[in-house]
Amino acid sequence: MKNQVEIILISKKRNFLKNFRFPLPVILISVGMLLFLTISAIALSVNSTHRTFVRIRRTKVERENRNLVTKLDSLSMSLKRARMLFDEHVGQDNRERTYWQMAHIHPDIWSMGIGGKQVERSPHIMNKNLERTINEIHESIDVLKGKYYLRQTSLREIQTQIEESEYLWSHMPSIHPVPGRRICSGYGYRVDPIAGDIRMHWGIDIGAPRGTIILATADGVVDFTGWVGGYGWTVVVDHGFGFKTAYAHCQRILVKRRELVKRGQAIARVGSTGRSISPHLHYEVRVSGMKINPYKYINTSSIIFD
Protein backbone atom coordinates (compact mmCIF):
# COMPACT_ATOMS: atom_id res chain seq x y z
CA MET A 1 0.00 0.00 0.00
CA LYS A 2 1.06 3.45 -0.69
CA ASN A 3 2.06 5.81 2.08
CA GLN A 4 2.86 2.91 4.39
CA VAL A 5 6.07 1.75 5.94
CA GLU A 6 6.58 -1.95 6.56
CA ILE A 7 8.87 -3.05 9.41
CA ILE A 8 9.96 -6.71 9.51
CA LEU A 9 11.38 -8.28 12.67
CA ILE A 10 13.33 -11.57 12.20
CA SER A 11 14.87 -13.80 14.89
CA LYS A 12 16.76 -16.93 13.62
CA LYS A 13 17.27 -18.39 17.07
CA ARG A 14 13.60 -18.36 17.85
CA ASN A 15 12.50 -18.87 14.25
CA PHE A 16 10.56 -15.67 14.54
CA LEU A 17 9.27 -13.50 11.75
CA LYS A 18 7.00 -10.60 12.22
CA ASN A 19 6.17 -7.67 10.05
CA PHE A 20 4.45 -4.42 10.93
CA ARG A 21 2.94 -1.87 8.68
CA PHE A 22 2.55 1.76 9.76
CA PRO A 23 1.20 4.69 7.85
CA LEU A 24 3.97 7.08 6.78
CA PRO A 25 2.45 10.08 8.64
CA VAL A 26 2.47 8.09 11.86
CA ILE A 27 6.15 7.24 11.37
CA LEU A 28 7.03 10.85 10.63
CA ILE A 29 5.11 12.10 13.64
CA SER A 30 6.75 9.52 15.87
CA VAL A 31 10.24 10.40 14.62
CA GLY A 32 9.47 14.10 15.08
CA MET A 33 8.27 13.56 18.62
CA LEU A 34 11.36 11.47 19.39
CA LEU A 35 13.62 14.22 18.07
CA PHE A 36 11.69 16.83 20.01
CA LEU A 37 11.93 14.84 23.24
CA THR A 38 15.64 14.23 22.67
CA ILE A 39 16.38 17.90 22.00
CA SER A 40 14.26 18.95 24.96
CA ALA A 41 16.10 16.55 27.24
CA ILE A 42 19.44 17.86 26.03
CA ALA A 43 18.29 21.46 26.48
CA LEU A 44 16.97 20.75 29.97
CA SER A 45 20.24 19.05 30.86
CA VAL A 46 22.32 21.96 29.56
CA ASN A 47 20.10 24.47 31.33
CA SER A 48 20.26 22.50 34.57
CA THR A 49 24.05 22.31 34.33
CA HIS A 50 24.25 26.04 33.61
CA ARG A 51 21.99 26.87 36.56
CA THR A 52 24.13 24.66 38.76
CA PHE A 53 27.31 26.50 37.70
CA VAL A 54 25.60 29.86 38.16
CA ARG A 55 24.42 28.85 41.63
CA ILE A 56 27.92 27.67 42.57
CA ARG A 57 29.46 30.88 41.23
CA ARG A 58 26.87 33.02 43.00
CA THR A 59 27.50 31.18 46.23
CA LYS A 60 31.23 31.76 45.84
CA VAL A 61 30.72 35.47 45.03
CA GLU A 62 28.38 35.90 47.98
CA ARG A 63 30.92 34.23 50.28
CA GLU A 64 33.69 36.45 48.92
CA ASN A 65 31.47 39.52 49.35
CA ARG A 66 30.76 38.56 52.95
CA ASN A 67 34.49 38.16 53.57
CA LEU A 68 35.12 41.49 51.84
CA VAL A 69 32.49 43.24 53.96
CA THR A 70 34.02 41.73 57.11
CA LYS A 71 37.50 42.93 56.10
CA LEU A 72 36.19 46.36 55.15
CA ASP A 73 34.38 46.66 58.48
CA SER A 74 37.60 45.73 60.27
CA LEU A 75 39.56 48.26 58.20
CA SER A 76 36.94 50.92 58.89
CA MET A 77 37.19 50.30 62.64
CA SER A 78 40.99 50.44 62.49
CA LEU A 79 40.84 53.77 60.68
CA LYS A 80 38.40 55.13 63.24
CA ARG A 81 40.75 54.08 66.04
CA ALA A 82 43.62 55.71 64.16
CA ARG A 83 41.62 58.95 63.97
CA MET A 84 40.97 58.78 67.71
CA LEU A 85 44.66 58.12 68.40
CA PHE A 86 45.62 61.05 66.18
CA ASP A 87 43.56 63.27 68.46
CA GLU A 88 46.36 62.72 71.00
CA HIS A 89 48.72 64.36 68.51
CA VAL A 90 46.30 67.26 68.24
CA GLY A 91 46.40 67.63 72.03
CA GLN A 92 50.21 67.42 71.96
CA ASP A 93 50.29 70.06 69.26
CA ASN A 94 48.18 72.37 71.43
CA ARG A 95 50.47 71.80 74.43
CA GLU A 96 53.57 72.54 72.35
CA ARG A 97 52.03 75.71 70.97
CA THR A 98 51.01 76.80 74.46
CA TYR A 99 54.56 76.25 75.74
CA TRP A 100 56.09 78.25 72.91
CA GLN A 101 53.40 80.95 73.17
CA MET A 102 51.89 80.23 69.76
CA ALA A 103 48.23 80.41 68.79
CA HIS A 104 46.37 77.07 68.71
CA ILE A 105 45.06 75.65 65.44
CA HIS A 106 41.26 75.90 65.46
CA PRO A 107 39.38 72.55 65.73
CA ASP A 108 37.52 73.32 62.49
CA ILE A 109 40.85 73.41 60.69
CA TRP A 110 41.90 70.11 62.24
CA SER A 111 38.71 68.61 60.71
CA MET A 112 39.63 69.75 57.20
CA GLY A 113 39.81 66.15 55.94
CA ILE A 114 36.11 65.39 56.42
CA GLY A 115 34.45 64.86 53.07
CA GLY A 116 35.94 61.88 51.37
CA LYS A 117 35.44 60.49 47.92
CA GLN A 118 31.96 59.16 47.18
CA VAL A 119 31.84 55.78 45.48
CA GLU A 120 29.49 55.35 42.52
CA ARG A 121 27.45 52.28 43.37
CA SER A 122 26.48 49.63 40.86
CA PRO A 123 23.26 47.93 42.04
CA HIS A 124 24.38 44.64 40.48
CA ILE A 125 27.71 44.56 42.28
CA MET A 126 27.57 46.57 45.49
CA ASN A 127 24.87 46.72 48.14
CA LYS A 128 24.17 49.80 50.26
CA ASN A 129 25.99 48.51 53.33
CA LEU A 130 29.13 47.87 51.32
CA GLU A 131 28.84 51.26 49.67
CA ARG A 132 28.47 52.99 53.05
CA THR A 133 31.46 51.13 54.48
CA ILE A 134 33.69 52.07 51.54
CA ASN A 135 32.61 55.72 51.77
CA GLU A 136 33.41 55.73 55.51
CA ILE A 137 36.86 54.33 54.74
CA HIS A 138 37.50 57.03 52.14
CA GLU A 139 36.34 59.66 54.64
CA SER A 140 38.62 58.31 57.38
CA ILE A 141 41.60 58.24 55.03
CA ASP A 142 40.93 61.82 53.93
CA VAL A 143 40.63 62.97 57.55
CA LEU A 144 43.91 61.28 58.50
CA LYS A 145 45.68 62.70 55.45
CA GLY A 146 44.44 66.19 56.23
CA LYS A 147 45.48 65.96 59.88
CA TYR A 148 48.83 64.44 58.97
CA TYR A 149 49.75 67.25 56.57
CA LEU A 150 48.46 69.86 59.04
CA ARG A 151 50.53 68.32 61.87
CA GLN A 152 53.60 68.37 59.61
CA THR A 153 53.02 72.07 58.88
CA SER A 154 52.48 72.80 62.56
CA LEU A 155 55.67 70.95 63.54
CA ARG A 156 57.65 73.04 61.06
CA GLU A 157 56.16 76.22 62.55
CA ILE A 158 56.96 75.04 66.08
CA GLN A 159 60.52 74.13 65.04
CA THR A 160 60.98 77.60 63.57
CA GLN A 161 59.64 79.14 66.79
CA ILE A 162 62.03 76.98 68.86
CA GLU A 163 65.00 78.01 66.75
CA GLU A 164 64.05 81.67 66.99
CA SER A 165 63.53 81.36 70.75
CA GLU A 166 66.84 79.55 71.23
CA TYR A 167 68.57 82.23 69.19
CA LEU A 168 66.96 84.92 71.34
CA TRP A 169 67.81 83.10 74.57
CA SER A 170 71.42 82.62 73.49
CA HIS A 171 71.64 86.41 73.05
CA MET A 172 69.87 87.28 76.30
CA PRO A 173 72.16 87.87 79.32
CA SER A 174 71.48 85.10 81.80
CA ILE A 175 74.58 83.72 83.52
CA HIS A 176 76.79 85.00 86.32
CA PRO A 177 79.77 86.89 84.84
CA VAL A 178 82.04 85.75 87.72
CA PRO A 179 80.52 82.43 88.86
CA GLY A 180 80.55 81.73 92.59
CA ARG A 181 81.56 85.26 93.56
CA ARG A 182 79.51 87.49 95.81
CA ILE A 183 77.57 90.64 94.97
CA CYS A 184 79.13 93.45 97.01
CA SER A 185 76.74 96.18 95.99
CA GLY A 186 73.38 96.04 94.24
CA TYR A 187 71.54 98.14 91.69
CA GLY A 188 69.97 101.41 92.91
CA TYR A 189 70.72 104.40 95.10
CA ARG A 190 73.57 104.00 97.61
CA VAL A 191 76.21 105.89 99.54
CA ASP A 192 79.13 106.32 97.17
CA PRO A 193 82.19 104.59 98.72
CA ILE A 194 84.57 107.32 97.49
CA ALA A 195 82.57 110.56 97.52
CA GLY A 196 80.42 109.61 100.51
CA ASP A 197 77.22 111.07 99.00
CA ILE A 198 74.13 109.25 97.72
CA ARG A 199 74.32 108.36 94.06
CA MET A 200 72.56 106.04 91.64
CA HIS A 201 74.47 102.80 91.10
CA TRP A 202 73.59 101.61 87.58
CA GLY A 203 74.82 98.05 87.93
CA ILE A 204 76.01 95.49 90.46
CA ASP A 205 79.49 95.07 91.93
CA ILE A 206 80.85 91.54 92.21
CA GLY A 207 83.85 91.11 94.46
CA ALA A 208 86.63 88.78 93.28
CA PRO A 209 90.42 88.51 93.48
CA ARG A 210 92.43 90.45 90.96
CA GLY A 211 92.90 88.45 87.76
CA THR A 212 89.72 86.35 88.15
CA ILE A 213 88.19 85.45 84.76
CA ILE A 214 85.12 87.46 83.65
CA LEU A 215 82.65 85.63 81.38
CA ALA A 216 80.38 86.97 78.64
CA THR A 217 76.82 86.45 79.87
CA ALA A 218 75.36 85.80 76.39
CA ASP A 219 76.32 85.46 72.73
CA GLY A 220 77.14 88.71 71.00
CA VAL A 221 79.68 91.00 69.37
CA VAL A 222 82.23 93.08 71.26
CA ASP A 223 80.99 96.62 70.79
CA PHE A 224 83.68 98.46 72.74
CA THR A 225 86.97 97.85 74.54
CA GLY A 226 88.96 100.61 76.21
CA TRP A 227 89.25 103.10 79.01
CA VAL A 228 86.05 104.86 80.15
CA GLY A 229 86.66 107.48 82.89
CA GLY A 230 85.62 106.15 86.31
CA TYR A 231 84.81 102.75 84.76
CA GLY A 232 88.47 102.11 83.99
CA TRP A 233 89.19 99.38 81.47
CA THR A 234 85.78 98.36 80.11
CA VAL A 235 84.27 95.82 77.72
CA VAL A 236 80.83 96.35 76.17
CA VAL A 237 79.16 93.44 74.36
CA ASP A 238 76.22 93.96 72.00
CA HIS A 239 73.95 90.89 72.16
CA GLY A 240 71.37 92.09 69.68
CA PHE A 241 67.61 92.36 70.33
CA GLY A 242 68.38 95.60 72.22
CA PHE A 243 70.60 93.93 74.84
CA LYS A 244 74.06 95.17 75.80
CA THR A 245 76.24 94.30 78.79
CA ALA A 246 79.15 96.29 80.26
CA TYR A 247 82.06 94.90 82.30
CA ALA A 248 84.06 97.61 84.08
CA HIS A 249 87.19 98.05 86.29
CA CYS A 250 88.94 95.25 84.39
CA GLN A 251 92.62 94.51 84.96
CA ARG A 252 93.03 93.10 81.49
CA ILE A 253 90.81 92.77 78.38
CA LEU A 254 90.98 89.46 76.50
CA VAL A 255 88.88 90.30 73.41
CA LYS A 256 88.94 92.82 70.61
CA ARG A 257 86.26 95.11 69.19
CA ARG A 258 83.95 93.42 66.64
CA GLU A 259 84.96 89.99 67.90
CA LEU A 260 82.19 87.38 68.16
CA VAL A 261 81.83 85.96 71.67
CA LYS A 262 79.78 83.09 73.07
CA ARG A 263 77.99 82.80 76.40
CA GLY A 264 80.52 81.67 79.01
CA GLN A 265 83.56 82.82 77.03
CA ALA A 266 86.36 84.59 78.95
CA ILE A 267 86.48 88.24 77.88
CA ALA A 268 88.47 89.98 80.65
CA ARG A 269 90.01 89.69 84.12
CA VAL A 270 88.86 91.34 87.34
CA GLY A 271 90.78 94.42 88.35
CA SER A 272 90.44 97.73 90.19
CA THR A 273 91.00 100.26 87.41
CA GLY A 274 89.20 103.57 87.23
CA ARG A 275 87.12 104.83 90.16
CA SER A 276 87.52 101.81 92.42
CA ILE A 277 88.82 101.06 95.92
CA SER A 278 89.23 97.28 95.62
CA PRO A 279 89.23 94.52 92.94
CA HIS A 280 85.73 93.86 91.69
CA LEU A 281 83.60 93.72 88.53
CA HIS A 282 81.04 96.45 87.88
CA TYR A 283 78.42 94.72 85.68
CA GLU A 284 75.62 96.47 83.80
CA VAL A 285 72.78 95.29 81.61
CA ARG A 286 71.35 97.76 79.10
CA VAL A 287 68.07 97.16 77.27
CA SER A 288 67.35 99.51 74.37
CA GLY A 289 69.75 102.02 75.93
CA MET A 290 68.21 101.83 79.40
CA LYS A 291 70.33 100.52 82.29
CA ILE A 292 68.30 97.71 83.89
CA ASN A 293 68.84 95.89 87.16
CA PRO A 294 71.23 93.04 86.16
CA TYR A 295 69.73 90.84 88.90
CA LYS A 296 66.79 90.16 86.56
CA TYR A 297 69.16 88.70 83.98
CA ILE A 298 71.42 86.56 86.16
CA ASN A 299 71.14 82.93 87.20
CA THR A 300 71.24 83.46 90.96
CA SER A 301 71.85 79.82 91.92
CA SER A 302 75.56 80.48 92.58
CA ILE A 303 75.38 84.02 93.95
CA ILE A 304 76.15 84.98 97.55
CA PHE A 305 74.46 88.18 98.67
CA ASP A 306 75.84 90.45 101.37
Image (cartoon, rainbow, N blue to C red):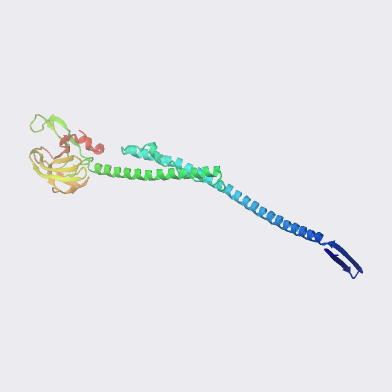
Spot occupied by residue 161 in the image (x, y as percentages of width and height) = 29, 42
Q: Quadrant of the C terminus?
A: top left
**Residue 35, percent across and down?**
75, 59
Q: Residue at x 16, y 35 (%)?
A: 291
Q: Quadrant of residue 170?
A: top left
Residue at 87%, 67% (x, y): give it.
9
Residue 304 in sight in this render? no
Residue nearer the viewer, 93 or 69: 69
Q: Which quadrant of the rendered structure holds the N terminus?
A: bottom right
Residue 27 lies left or right of residue 250; in this view the side is: right
267 with respect to 194 (left or right): right
Q: How many marks?
A: 0
Q: Is residue 283 left or right of residue 92?
A: left
Question: Which residue appears farthest toward the right when viewing the image?
Answer: 15
Specify the farthest residue to the bottom.
Answer: 12
Closest to the observer: 236 or 233? 236
In this rendering, the answer to whether 294 lies above or below 8 is above
Residue closer to the observer: 2 or 95 = 2
- Residue 55 point in image, percent of width and height: 65, 51
Q: Is residue 191 left or right of residue 122?
A: left
Q: Position of residue 272 (x, y in %)?
A: 11, 41
Q: Residue furthest top?
A: 198
| Image quadrant in which you'd find residue 29 | bottom right
Residue 133 shows in this picture: yes
In this rendered view, identify the residue nearer to me: 170 or 176.
170
Instruction: Indicate whether 6 appears above or below 266.
Output: below
